[in-house]
Amino acid sequence: MSSLRETDVVTIGESMVLLQPMNEGPLAYAPMFTRSIAGAESNVSIGLSRLGFKVRWISRLGADPFGDVILSTLAGEGIDVSQAVRDTQYPTAVYFKEFKGYGDPNVYYYRKGSAVSQLTPAHVESSWLQGAKHLHVTGITPALGPETADTIRELMVQARKNGMTISFDPNLRRKLWSEEEARETLLSLIPLCDIFLPGIEEAEFLVGERTEDQYGAHFLELGAKAVILKLGEHGSIGYAGNRAVKARPYPVTRIIDTVGAGDAFAAGFLSGFLENGDLEQGDNLLRALTRANFMGSLATQYKGDWEGLPKRDELLRLLSGGKEVTR
Ligand code: KDG
């Protein structure tokens, strides 16, 4: 086996070509679109890569032009795509957004029967995790095909055996599976992760209505070492060991597009975790949460799922209140 470069983070998931209407309003009346790419795991990969981390993104893509676009975009962001497989039988997925001018955008998926939906545990290669410190997975991949949940589970088990840390963002996508299936599968993956990153509504979906502290205690009891609750406009709260730390939100004056904010948050949090380590020590948890809140708020101010993610020097300058010289 050829040796792969050292990697900070490995992630696995589906990226799609994203078509966004150039005007607001119903998709049925949208004549023109811009083309980008999107996918929760590749969004996190871009966020981390721009902050200077080495990231390996694993996936399957059709042997089609849309697969080419995704690969060249991610490679252009400095991400290791060498383990992504081209599938000659099944296509790359596509998704559309619809901006109604109020609330979150609607999304329409064309991903049934995609290359990633065919993923099985038999595809897992030991090279995927080689030389890596951390695995990040989401609850989207398990929803995509008959054996994709088992594949994610297998990878988490292998990562554990390799001594890697693991983060898991449930990323509930109700359009992809039934509520019962989603709840059962997502809950079953929590004991395999170190860092669990649910939004407050996802926590409620999983275990019913409780207080923030009860969510934290419950998910820690299930086996996560840290629970990071995203509270939207109220910031976030993290639980690790006996600690509970709340981080204030960054005010956003104009929200353009909320899709991808959770992934920006995850990239921000993981970057803090990877830089500072043990979340039970000192102010490590607060620093990671603060960065996560800032990245999440920044992401909502751009159209597109990842385009607004900052590079390291920009992030550090903005976080310290520095102004940009624009002309
Ligand atoms: O978290 C944002 C992602 O959800 C988006 O980029 C596309 O993967 C995607 C999905 O399934 O919605």
Image: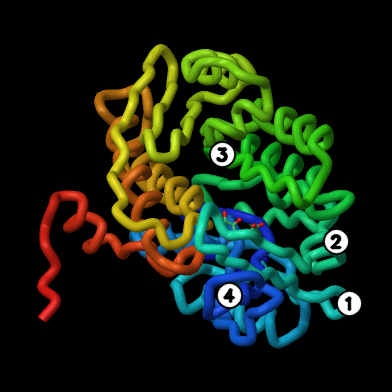
Describe the element under mark 2 as helix, strand or loop.
helix
Figure quadrant of the N terminus: bottom right
Residue 86 in the figure: left or right of residue 302: right
Describe the element under mark 4 as helix, strand or loop.
strand
Gap between marks 4 and 2 measured at Cα: 26 Å
User: Quick one: label 3 or label 2, which is nearer the N terminus?
Assistant: 2
Residue that badge 3 annotates: 166
Describe the element under mark 3 as helix, strand or loop.
strand
Q: In the rendered picture of this protein, how many numbered marks are placed on residues?
A: 4
Gap between marks 4 and 3 measured at Cα: 32 Å
Describe the element under mark 1 as helix, strand or loop.
loop
How many neighbours does mark 3 have within 10 angstroms: few (below 14), some (14-19), or many (20 or more)? many
Q: Residue at x 45, y 72 (%)?
A: 78
Above or below residue 216? Residue 68 is below
Q: Mark 4: which amino acid?
A: Gln
Gap between marks 1 and 2 measured at Cα: 10 Å
Residue that badge 2 annotates: 118
How many neighbours does mark 4 have within 10 angstroms: few (below 14), some (14-19), or many (20 or more)? many
Q: Residue at x 75, y 85 (%)?
A: 64
Gap between marks 3 and 2 measured at Cα: 23 Å
Gap between marks 1 and 4 measured at Cα: 27 Å
Is mark 1 in CB contact (under 8 Å) with mark 2?
A: yes
Above or below residue 131? Residue 303 is below
Residue that badge 1 annotates: 89
Location of residue 201 in the rendering, given as x and y in whole percent from the top left corner: 58, 33
Gap between marks 1 and 3 measured at Cα: 32 Å
Location of residue 237 in the rendering, given as x and y in whole percent from the top left corner: 40, 27
When asked about the image quadrant of residue 114, the answer is bottom right
Decide if ligand 1 comes within 8 Å of the CB at mark 2.
no
Residue that badge 4 annotates: 20
Q: Residue at x 62, y 35 (%)?
A: 160
User: Quick one: label 4 or label 2, which is nearer the N terminus?
Assistant: 4
